[in-house]
Amino acid sequence: MKRNLLIVAIALLAVAFVSCQKDGVYKPKKKIAKVYNEWTTTTVTTDSDGSRTVTNVQNPFVAEEWTWGDKTLNSVMHKDKDGKVTSTVNYTYDDKNRLAGSTCGSEKAEYVYNDDKKLQSIKITDSDDPDDSVVIEITYADKLPASVKTVRSYSFKSLSAFAKSVIPSYISEAIEADQMRTKTTVSYTYNTTIEWDGKNISQVVTTGENGYKYTTAYEYDGKTNPYKGMYSDMEDDFDIAYSKNNIVKKTVSRVNGNETRTVVTEYAYEYDGKMPSKITYTEEEEETVLGVNYKSTYVHVTTYEYTK
């Protein structure tokens, strides 16, 4: 499961209580200092011999440390459960204090805005591998995202953690599904359509060139979404960045050739004022492979510590 990256996305989105601010400008009510992660995974395997249950528990640990300037977020240091630094992402801004770029080692993401001051495109490149790039272009209708075109050019290697943190999950998973089919430098295009119900995204559908289809449906509560307006890290999809209300349930259906998988995730929030102090989400996934049934339940808790 791709959960550690999801938490990176949620954490970055939590910086911006910016529903009335300009796109790309970080002006949080509170500044995050540290992010703690913990989780429990339970897997039930059923076959002709019966059922077996395995449970894994990860106690809380510091997963991220944030460094701030006077007005902007300078960097986020990521750590594993043993306290080892796994990566550091640095951020740069334009003269309007909008996010202009982010870097991690040899990789970088560049953000371009249109004349309406909306995010127009994101380009991800790697100086160590010129053949490896991702370009995301966003089209708007009535000032809301309506479609996304993604072009992935790569040599045969997996998407990096940095790239996954920038690319919405329904696109990155389509890319990885296609990557399993080739060992040469190629270019694939992915098309995403976004449907709205009032001021909330109701469904997102991504299709690839090889029959891959990724459909995500959303349910919301009636509370104001404190993450609205922030898209510098969209691995947890456009729902958090663009919808007015809080997502409480997400249902994902993935079709890849003859394989169909469904994943349901439910979210619960705790607040300290208007900013989240804790997010708990529960994900359930079930699939049957060669007559063996696998049912997994994953509970992840993220706790935020803010600067004094």
Image (cartoon, rainbow, N blue to C red):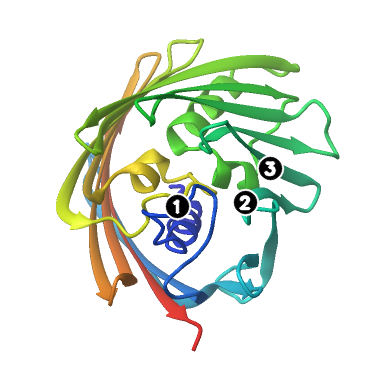
Nearer the observer: mark 2 or 3; the answer is 2
Q: CA distance from mark 2 to mark 3?
A: 10 Å
The disc at residue 99 is 2
In the rendered structure, which amino acid carries the disc numbered 3? Ala
The disc at residue 219 is none
Which image quadrant is residue 287 in?
Answer: top left
Q: Nearer the viewer, residue 262 or 230?
A: 230
Nearest to N terminus: mark 2 or mark 1 = 1
Q: Give the vertical position of 304 relative to 191 (above or below).
A: below
On the image, the x and y values in percent for residue 67 come to 64, 74
| Secondary structure of residue under mark 2 | strand
On the image, the x and y values in percent for residue 176 come to 55, 29
Is residue 56 visible to the viewer in this orientation of the structure?
no
**Mark 3 = which residue?**
109
In the rendered structure, which amino acid carries the disc numbered 2? Leu
Q: Is residue 126 left or right of residue 204?
A: right
